[in-house]
Image: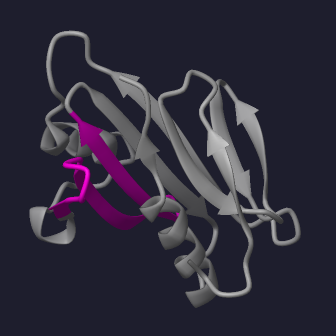
Amino acid sequence: MEENIQYQAYRSPKGIYMFAYPEHWTYEIIEEIPAFYDPEINDGAFQVSSFQNKIGEFDLNEEMKRFLKFHTFEFDEEAVASFTNNEGSKIMACEFISEERFWMVYMIANLNRLLVCTYNSDNSPNKSLSLILSDMISSIRFIGE
């Protein structure tokens, strides 16, 4: 984790996931989606949306294509990182600019559960913020069934 920054745990209200975020950050729930941000900078927000597929597993390629299309950005497989973490969750990630805003999206799927983590801002994150966002994303864990 980023040095000299204290983190605290966030657990989703429905007990689906948890992760760590900086103690000095705050969050608001907007339309049932938590938005985390640094109140001193207030230049972007990290959001996590959770979904459950009642009839099967998620197809991350299709989910990423749908998300990018909604944001008027074309899916380019070479611009999307894909990997599996040590818990067996499949992950796809990419960054793009849409309507003059920087977007970072991580999709994390484990069986029939999907987390869509986004960060968007008027500016690209600096090195320090990039490390914080990386720490937050790396700490995400599915909990419960």
Q: Quadrant of residue 106?
A: bottom left
Q: Main secondary structure of the magenta part?
A: strand
Seen at 14% across and 18% down, the residue is: 56
Image spot of residue 78 (x, y percent): 11, 70
Decide if residue 124 is in sight here: no
Seen at 18% across and 42% down, the residue is: 60
- Decide if residue 46 is on the left or right side of residue 56: right
Residue 19 located within the stretch drawn in magenta: no
Image spot of residue 15 (x, y percent): 54, 26
What range of the chain is rendered magenta?
A: 82-110
Seen at 48% across and 71% down, the residue is: 134
Q: Quadrant of residue 97?
A: bottom left
- Decide if residue 94 is on the left or right side of residue 71: left
Residue 117, compared with residue 2, is above or below; it is above
Instruction: Give the residue at the far top of this rendering.
Output: 55
- Viewer-proximal residue, 93 or 91? 91
- Decide if residue 89 is on the left or right side of residue 51: left
- The quadrant of the image that shows the C terminus is top left
Residue 88 located within the stretch drawn in magenta: yes
Type of colouring: one colour
Image spot of residue 65 (x, y percent): 21, 44
- Viewer-proximal residue, 68 or 113? 113
Image spot of residue 27 (x, y percent): 77, 46
- Decide if residue 25 is on the left or right side of residue 65: right
Residue 93, compared with residue 29, is above or below; it is below
- The quadrant of the image that shows the N terminus is bottom right
Instruction: Give the residue at the far right of this rendering.
Output: 40
Decide if residue 83 is in sight here: yes
Q: How many marks?
A: 0
